[in-house]
Image (cartoon, rainbow, N blue to C red):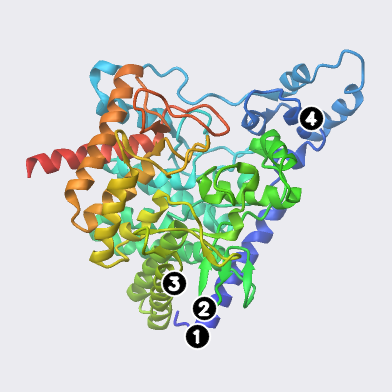
Amino acid sequence: MIFKSASFFIVLLILSLSACKQKTETKHQSPRDLFPGLFEAVQAGHVFEDSKTFTDCMPKRDPEDILKTYQEEKNKAGFNLKAFVDKNFSLPEEVAKDYQTNIRAGVEPHIRSLWDVLTRRPDKYYQYSSLLALPQPYVVPGGRFREVYYWDSYFTMLGLEESGRTDLIESMVNNFAYLIRTYGFIPNGNRTYYLTRSQPPYFSLMVKLLMENKKLKGDSVLKANRDALEREYSFWMNNNDAKKGANLHVVFMPDGEKLNRYFDSGDWPREEAYSEDVAIAANSSASKPEVYRHLRSGAESGWDYSSRWFSDGKTLNTIQTTDIIPVDLNALLYHLEIMLAKAYQIGGDDKAKDFMTRSAEQRKIAIMKYCWDKEAGWFRDYNWKSEMATSSMSLAGVYPMYFNMIATSRADTMANTLQQKFLKPGGLVSTLATTGQQWDAPNGWAPLQWMAIAGLSTYKKEELSREVSRRWSSLNVNVFNKTGKLMEKYNVVDTAVFAGGGEYPNQDGFGWTNGVLLKILARQKNQSIQ
């Protein structure tokens, strides 16, 4: 199809998104919708240690019957809420609870054996489950994360690639395309309570990875997923023809540029973190709906939570996520535009290709204009309300380097900053602030290590790239040799201490740590051979 104009192209994308939204809203109810009153009582009463547990429970009978019984019994003497929940709901299964680690076999055999343990077969649809059924197998992170997660999955796929599991990569890409075609976007995870938000848009990178692994069939992979890439783009770019300020995910800059922010469509407490959100809102000077929106949007970023989003750079109750234009999000959307341009070129849609190419170039120029801090030698997020860069320096700044968006001289400066400020004994620290939040110092996370390692290699900064790889992989392997586990995150400042912070204990498993570590170890072997 040849698009007559860029405006027609955008209108088409927005219409497709609207249709998908209507379909989503009428089909699914979350636990909060199904059990009004009971849901809030369970979460506020801390029936379970983890707020996510109840959201993943399965009702043993019709929700209306459960609610009727609850209303009849809740005010009776001796009523026990936990006993009521145990009687009427089935607890979610733990991931890999019976798995026994063989430390002596080594970390690589351990990871390869874990793929099958962390793989879920095609889901069956259950009417009142919070799980959104997926048609093909997929890999979950592990621990409390019993469902597929969007941006986690790309880094998991890197390890699947090293394990020769192209079959799983393809089935996961197909699942994400299914989610886009069904709901108009990829939710945070395949749960009903995640249908108000997405996560960092890595789908275009997943498609690219599958193309590279399908070799001669690469173009056919792109063609097959073109419609899904379009709908992903419309989700992030839907702006209802606004011309200033912000609308949903789009921010109109003072000079006419369009950039993006994280934006959850809900303004109530997250169901999977209900009591935590209520407590935060109670201690904030902002209105509760505003705080809940910022918290939810912070969850969409994947960095839940970090000083990146705090107006005072220190405390969670000053969160202002939707005021911020994140450099990583916009670099990811730049890649999505590049991939769409390639898809249109393959399909012979020259006008659409030119539109996307221009959009990518305009976005790149805007990122340089608003996010580059020459004095710091780093990319910072930008606060569109205060019209100035935020004070936070974070590893989100490596994304333009990863996507080869910058000049070599700028990469030189960034490598210097990375080495001097972010490099620690166990790898790269996520931010330079220590706040008690899990996406701040002293913690390091596998996806950010990989974006930095690969970004440095893109600009031939191999010595530093290898040093980051060595420190991170050594920390991973040392913890594995002591505990038999690979963790969700690590303390890279004091390598003798486990990482902490955030709303839940450190998780083991763990999908993206497994994937990135396998990728790094394979690179190290190849480099030693060379």
- Mark 3 vs mark 2: which is more N-terminal? 2
In terms of depth relative to the viewer, which is nearer, 396 or 194?
A: 396
Please give left or right for residue 246 compared with residue 5 in the image.
Answer: right
| Residue 163 seen by the camera | no
Say few, some or many: other residues with alpha carbon within 10 Å of mark 1 (under 14 / 14 to 19 / 20 or more).
few
Q: CA distance from mark 1 to mark 3?
A: 23 Å
Secondary structure type for disc 2: helix
In terms of depth relative to the viewer, which is nearer, 441 or 198?
A: 441
Marks 1,2: beta carbons within 8 A: yes
* Residue named by callout 2: 9
Q: Horizontal and vertical percent for residue 293?
A: 67, 51
What residue is drawn where x is 79% and y is 30%?
41
| Residue 11 seen by the camera | yes
Marks 2,4: beta carbons within 8 A: no
Residue 366 numbered mark, or none: 3
Q: CA distance from mark 4 to mark 3?
A: 47 Å
* Residue named by callout 1: 5
Say few, some or many: other residues with alpha carbon within 10 Å of mark 4 (under 14 / 14 to 19 / 20 or more).
few
Q: Amino acid at mark 3?
A: Ala
Q: CA distance from mark 1 to mark 2?
A: 6 Å
Q: Quarter holding the N terminus?
A: bottom left
Query: Is label 2 or label 4 in front?
Result: 4
Query: Is label 4 or label 1 in front?
Result: 4
Secondary structure type for disc 3: helix
Q: Amino acid at mark 4?
A: Ala
What residue is drawn where x is 49% and y is 54%?
391
Q: CA distance from mark 4 to mark 1?
A: 53 Å
Q: CA distance from mark 3 to mark 2?
A: 22 Å
Query: Which residue in the rendered view is the most extreme toward the front?
Result: 375
* Residue named by callout 4: 41
Query: Is label 3 or label 2 in front?
Result: 3
